[in-house]
Image: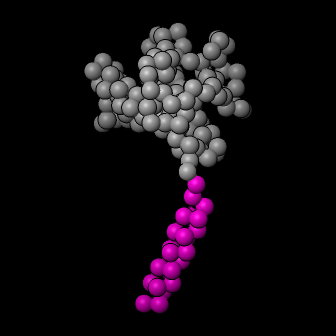
Amino acid sequence: MTSHLSSFWRLVRLARELERDRRPARLVVIESPYGRNPDGSVASPETIERNVRYLRACMADSLRRGEAPIASHAMYTQPGVLDDSQPEERRKGMLAGWAWHERADAVVVYRDLGVTPPSVLRVASIPTLRACPTPSSIPGEWAGQWSGSG
């Protein structure tokens, strides 16, 4: 019984420490390439795989900045959620992502791999966007991988 109580009080102390350290995080929508190339063409499976790796790096970068990021193009395209190759399902995912844009403190457009037409469309189509889109890049392995402008 004593070990259960001590474990309980350790958890209570941890919860109090977390609450004390908690601060409101900036809610951020991440825009980055996924299923399209910067020229608007459909990305190959290899490019999509690279884009997902890049998106993970974007999410990690945002978390390191103390932000609370969301990337709908990463979540809704998971197996069993929506099929990005089906126009109606892709549309549902885009509409759901736009709902997050309307509530976010910022939209951060990561541009190391270029800016794709869907990202531009998502940002331009939000009449109630609360903040100007912020361009960002990740130093290191992703820097300079795209030679276009934007």
Q: Nearer the viewer, residue 122 or 79?
A: 122
The answer to whether residue 97 is magenta is no
Quarter of the image for residue 108 reads top right
In x, y percent, where is residue 50?
Answer: 54, 27
The answer to whether residue 11 is magenta is yes
- Highlighted magenta segment, given as a residue range: 1-23
Q: Is residue 130 above or below residue 11?
A: above
**Residue drawn where x is 31% and y is 30% of the image:** 82
Q: How many marks?
A: 0
Left or right, 105 with respect to 95, comes to right
**Residue drawn where x is 50% and y is 75% of the image:** 12
* Residue 52 appears in the figure: no
* Residue 21 appears in the figure: yes
Left or right, 58 with respect to 125, comes to right
Q: Quadrant of the C terminus?
A: top right
In x, y percent, where is residue 100?
Answer: 42, 34
Q: Quadrant of the N terminus?
A: bottom left
Dominant secondary structure of the magenta stretch?
helix
**Residue drawn where x is 51% and y is 80% of the image:** 9
Considering every residue shown, the one lying at the far left of the view is: 88
